[in-house]
Image: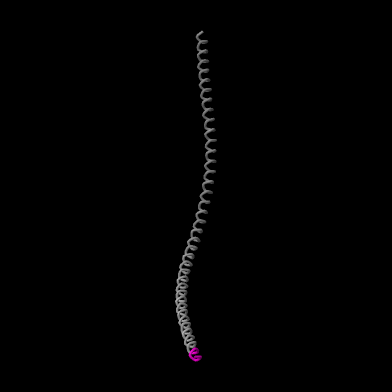
Amino acid sequence: ENEGNKGKQLLEMQREIESLCQTIDDLEAKLEEYDSALQSAEEKYKDEKETLDSKIFQQRLLLNSLTAEKTKLEGKVSDGNSQISAMSRAFMEEKSHLEQKMEEMQQTIESFEEEKEKSHLEQKMEEMQQTIESFEEEK
């Protein structure tokens, strides 16, 4: 009876060992699946990272190019503003000069008109003087 119990115990232990071996095999299979999935995910991550790194590099190049273009355009705007300021100053100086010339011309016109009137009055006075002299001679 003792030997029968030992035989049963051995048989049961053998079944438990076989069950544990099967569980280990199942776990190793799952581990291989997970390992394969992990490698696949790592490769996908690596590919995506390379793609993103490439895009980031391209965007940085574009940003640098745009920054250089912006700086160049800002320089042109600054030059344009300087030219506009210089032209505005020159225009204001020319305007002032023309206003001064117009003032001088107006004074000259007024002076000519005064001279003309004075000359006209002198001519009239001379005519009157001649008329007076003519009357005196007739008298």
- Report the front residue among 139 and 120: 120
x%, y% of residue 47?
45, 70
Q: Please, is residue 23 above or below residue 109 in the view?
A: below
- Report the front residue among 117 and 94: 94
Q: Please, is residue 31 above or below residue 61 in the view?
A: below
Instruction: Please name the predominant secondary structure of the magenta segment in the image.
Output: helix
Total number of numbered discs in the rendering: 0
Q: Residue at x 47, y 71 (%)?
A: 46
Give the farthest residue toward the top.
139
x%, y% of residue 97?
54, 38
Which residue range is magenta in the image? 1-6
Q: Residue at x 53, y 35 (%)?
A: 99
Q: Residue at x 51, y 51 (%)?
A: 77
Q: Please, is residue 32 above or below residue 131 in the view?
A: below
- Report the front residue among 6 and 131: 6
x%, y% of residue 7?
48, 90
Q: How is the image coloured?
A: one colour
Residue 101 painted magenta: no
